[in-house]
Amino acid sequence: MKITNIRIGEISVPLKTPFKTALRTVNSVEDIIVEIHTDTGNVGYGEAPPTGVITGDTKGAIIGALKDHIIKSIIGMDIENFEEIMLKLDKSLVKNTSAKAAIDIALYDLYGQLYNAPLYKMLGGYKKEIITDVTISVNDPEEMAKDSLDAIRRGFDTLKIKVGKDASMDLERMKAIRNAIGYDVKLRIDANQGWKPKEAVKILRKMEDTGLDIEFVEQPVEAHDIEGLKYVTDNISIPVLADESVFSAKDALTILQNRAADYINIKLMKTGGLHNALKICSIAEVYGVECMIGCMLEAKVSVNAAVHLAAAKSIITKIDLDGPVLCSEDPVEGGAIFDEFKITLNDAPGLGIKKVNGIRYLD
Ligand SMILES: C[C@H](N)C(=O)N[C@H](CCC(=O)O)C(=O)O
Ligand SMILES: [Mg+2]
């Protein structure tokens, strides 16, 4: 199964409501899609969202990385030589993890098709169904309480609450939500780097003292501030999950060796795809540290790949794969079925994607 052509396109999918974090506000998913075509007539699909404030990858940078570096380095190669293709992909240029992830995902899709097996079974096949949380955007406390109640009515039993914007309001936000929803639903919070270390400890201790029952706090401080992350982890009881601080397997090792966080959030757009995400799973297994699998604002192609990984690996115990349910439309035919909180895999080969509708080709 030789790679004969790699096509690049873009899709645009409006969100149901604006997505707001401490880092950005977004109204639609604007992602790059890749199709890897082979001499056997198979097509592998991949996707990359431009999340400049987190990965540094803009739309132009993703297209440039694909056209000027990555495609040239793997065209003509045989999917049977999978390890060799992955080495070429890694070495094609530094950083640019989103462009690499799009290609890595499409290659794994073809790898599954080559051996006629669904990807989650090839990676471990731990389960076939997973349950995701849903994100509540950062707004004023009343609106967040209302959005949380709506999410519970839709069946979600775990909410990921965005905080870290106008820090003085964060305690009020969480009190308003807890008062509205009661204690049967899990609340995890994500500050998206919005606090300083001492400020984070102050706010989180108040949340502890108020009995808000927070499952964990995600990325309280700036991504590069590992010392600050450790300071927060050492000084509160709520567990800390590292997100923007961990891109590579080496980053994960540094966090775990220093006990700078309690959990790791794996995202394919940070790792450069599944092959590096698998390395983080192995490191976490060695340390006995559970992982979350997350996504950026992504449609169903790349989130599908994350679903396969989540279903394959027992070390992934927390799921934040709500990208597709935040979208108002689904451009993807085939693949996993997203029914609000419940995500069910099927046993079609690879990712099981039949078609992506509405692609505007850029080649
Ligand atoms: C969409 C997902 N639930 C999420 O919250 N991801 C964010 C980053 C998303 C983005 O800005 O595109 C995160 O975990 O920080
Ligand atoms: Mg996060």
Image (tube, helix red, strand yellow):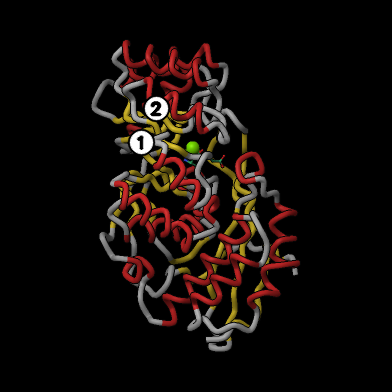
Left or right, residue 357 beside residue 339: right
Label 1 CB less than 8 angstroms from ligand 2: no
- Residue at figure coordinates x 28%, y 46% from the top left: 288
Left or right, residue 167 beside residue 158: right
Q: Earlier in the sequence, mark 1 or mark 2?
A: 2
Residue 262 is marked as 1
- Residue at figure coordinates x 34%, y 62% from the top left: 345
Q: Where does label 2 land, which residue?
A: 233
- Residue at figure coordinates x 31%, y 52% from the top left: 286
Residue 26 coordinates in the image, percent (x, y): 62, 37
Tell me the kind of residue under disc 1: Asp
Residue 11 coordinates in the image, percent (x, y): 64, 57
Residue 75 coordinates in the image, percent (x, y): 65, 79
Q: Nearer the viewer, residue 280 or 363?
A: 280
Left or right, residue 115 beside residue 223: left
Q: Nearer the viewer, residue 294 or 314?
A: 314
- Residue at figure coordinates x 40%, y 18% from the top left: 204
> With respect to residue 300, does 106 lie above or below?
below
Assign a secondary structure to mark 2: helix
Q: Quadrant where the C terminus lies?
A: bottom right
Find residue 165 and report its image quarter: top right
Tell me the kind of residue under disc 2: Thr
Left or right, residue 101 beside residue 279: right
- Separation (CA) of disc 1 from disc 2: 7 Å
Label 2 CB less than 8 angstroms from ligand 2: no
> With respect to residue 223, does 124 lie above or below?
below
